[in-house]
Image (cartoon, rainbow, N blue to C red):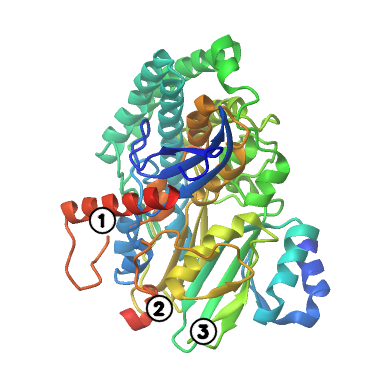
Amino acid sequence: MTDKNKNFIPIGPYHPLQEEPEYFRLHVEGEIVKSVDIELGYIHRGTEKISENKHFDQGVFLVERICGICSTSHPLAFVNAVENLARIEIPDRAKLIRCVVGEMERIHSHLLWLGLAGHFIGYNTVWMWSWKYREYILEVFEKVTGNRQHYAMMKIGGVRRDIANDDIPWIETNIDEIEKGLELFLKAITEDPVIHARTKGVGVLTKEDIKDYCAVGPVARASGIDMDVRKDTPYAAYGMVDWKVCTCDSGDIYGKAVVRILELFESLKIIRQCLGHMRNTGGPLDVNVKEIPEGEGIGRHEAPRGECFHYVRSDKTNRPVRHKIRAPSFVNVATNQKAVVGSHISDALLVLAAVDPCYCCTERVIVVNKKGKLMKGPDLIKLSQEKTDRIRKKGL
Amino acid sequence: MTSKIQELLSECSARIIGSEEARKGTHYIEVNPAYICEIAEVMHNKLGFRFITISGVDARKHIELIYSFADDKSGDVVSIKTKLFNKKDPAIDSLSKLIKGASWIEREVHEFFGVKFAGHQDLNHLLLGEDWPEGDYPYRHEND
């Protein structure tokens, strides 16, 4: 290193704990992190450009593949955008089903994060128990949608398939099982001194930081900002059910964990009410959408990680002329530039993971070689290795 | 229309070219690109809007930038539209000093549409590789 007083620690691009590629360069003095450089782009696929070549119905499937964890968040935000553009009002039963699927996804996503967070701090019991209870919701997904991931439930004008009223009691039994697990986790988080020692006062973001970085979702709510798209501008059936936005004032990792667990209780409440309404709400699952008029539309959905934003512009053809996607991690990951500063190196990994980052969402991509040659897996790996080499050389 | 949006319209009336509430809660306001920082400052600092993102659009004859802001109290989304007619060298003032959260999206719009954000401290590539050819902007229609 050129300056002996300045050291840095590279993390990535293959993250030692997370599944997705990203590169953090922690600049440290002794054990303390002084600043961080974040390098993205390893999984950029140009989804927005691909969408311009897909008709609107295909677009739903395309955006579903942006992310495997929140695979109904992008479709829901996209159909909200197209329905906003075309002034489409969907039937009540479709609204309820959208809500049920959206909240089930939140449950599985938050339990996934909780398990990983437990694993990061070396508390593997939390990891195993959390993923055990996550199985209950994945079983419901498999039965209701046919898949554990990529549910393909959303369509422009409604939903693609029904949830049978006969299945509702069985779904409710699974929901009850999850609630038992949540009580266990809430107790573990709020009472365990080891978890307190690793998470309280670590990676703190103040209200001002959240406003500066425009952070969203549980990251913002853990710093005392009560924003939630589901409450602020109720779409689907969120206006038909009773629930509250959960916040915490501490802004640290502990606050983020508590907010996520409390949100899970609210998600269960929403699902139970929606299932109750569904027993008495029949009717069609969709409306017939003949064409998408010229114009522009904005759709938002409160994904597990925060507000997912889609902007669609149509020129009256059957495909969008522009489709902009802003995933919640795009703004939340940037808060690491503040949250990790001042942390010990040993805490940095947990701080970087506390925003529940999703790089697939942040980068959205298929890479086509500029020479016109379609690149395959090994080519992409080679590109990635070359990029890492360049970054390393730059840092030295 | 909420009082906050009415206040925005009256405060910046001299700067606004046109405005419409396209749908309930979805507003579009067109402004001259020279005033983007002024409008953003009023929205972010004075009226408490949250910056969401910038959507770049290649509208063939010009580049359009749509700055979306949310009012989390009322659930309204206000999108500020600006048109950059110099497609060879589109430029606009950067919001990154005013709103830290605008820094990354300005880098993204810069690399995909070739818009220069004057005053941005670090307009390096965010998502594309550093060896991406200069002057090749993949979201422009010239590449279709």
* Place of residue B35 in the rendered image (x, y in percent of width and height, measured from the top left): 71, 77
- Three-letter amino acid code of the residue under disc 3: Asp
- Three-letter amino acid code of the residue under disc 1: Leu
- Three-letter amino acid code of the residue under disc 2: Gly
> Which element carries disc 1, helix, strand or loop?
helix
What residue did someone put label 1 on? A383
Q: Chain of mark 3?
A: B
Q: Chain of mark 2?
A: B
Instruction: Assess whether mark 3 and mark 2 are in contact (beta carbons under 8 angstroms).
Output: no
| Viewer-proximal residue among A60 and A367 | A367
Residue A68 at least partly seen: yes
Residue A87 at least partly seen: no
> Which element carries disc 3, helix, strand or loop?
loop
What residue did someone put label 2 on? B135
| Viewer-proximal residue among A107 and A379 | A379
- Establish whether labels 3 and 1 are both on one chain: no
Compare marks 2 and 3 and give the one earlier in the sequence: 3
Residue A242's place in the image compared with B87, above or below, is above
* Place of residue A18 in the rendered image (x, y in percent of width and height, measured from the top left): 37, 34
| Residue drawn at 52 percent across, 43 percent down | A3
* Left or right: A364 as drawn, with respect to A366: right
